Image (cartoon, helix red, strand yellow):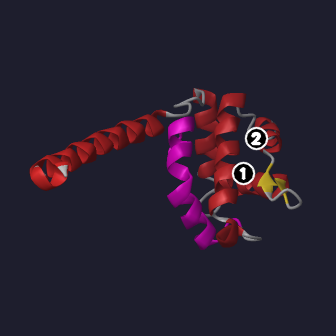
Amino acid sequence: IFFRIFPTALHNMHKKLFLIALCLLIAFASKEQDKGPKNVCTALDKETALKYKAMGPEPGMFRQILSGYSSHCYSILKLSMNEHCVVKKAMGLPFNLTRPCAECYAVSSTCGSQHCKLACLGRTMSPSCISCVDEHCTPATEVCSGILS
């Protein structure tokens, strides 16, 4: 009965609820972008990454070697990435990355295994895999590591 008598009250209430929902969505989205570590790789980590990026054909040896780690550390039985394995390998030769930096790339490997399974299955250096990883995972990895692709 109230809404028959006061139809504009209902309209105004919907506007207010919409604005509140919009504000909450914007606040949540900005907090989501703030999640995770930022620029954790040391100057030596960055120097190593840049050195290996310049080696070999595009997109460089850095990505190729990390891609190999991801392939080696993926568990087919669990259908998931073993991040500890990726961290351990990235902290070893040839990169010797610091743990926080290696963790950025382990998270990236997990992201790729979650978002790009079909594109990367058996061919982690294919253009379709690289494109998928760049779209879904690389931006967060760049923020975490401080190393641009």
Q: Nearer the viewer, residue 28 or 96?
A: 28
Identified at 69% across, 50% down, the residue is: 110
Q: Which mark is residue 90?
A: 2
The picture places residue 105, in percent across and down from the top left corner, at: 66, 43
* SS assignment at label 2: helix
Q: Is residue 93 left or right of residue 3?
A: right
Which residue is found at the position 82% from the left and 37% from the top? Answer: 88
Give the residue at x 73% y 70%. 123
First along the sequence among labels 2 and 1: 1
Dominant secondary structure of the residues highlighted in magenta in the image = helix
Mark 1 = which residue? 66
Report if the CB atoms under discs 2 and 1 are less than 8 Å apart.
Answer: yes
Q: Nearer the viewer, residue 83 or 27?
A: 27
Q: Nearer the viewer, residue 21 or 120?
A: 21
Residue 47: % across, % down: 59, 36
Label 2 crowd (10 A; few <14 / some 14-19 / many >=20): many
Viewer can see residue 58: no
Looking at the image, is 126 positioned above or below residue 50?
Answer: below
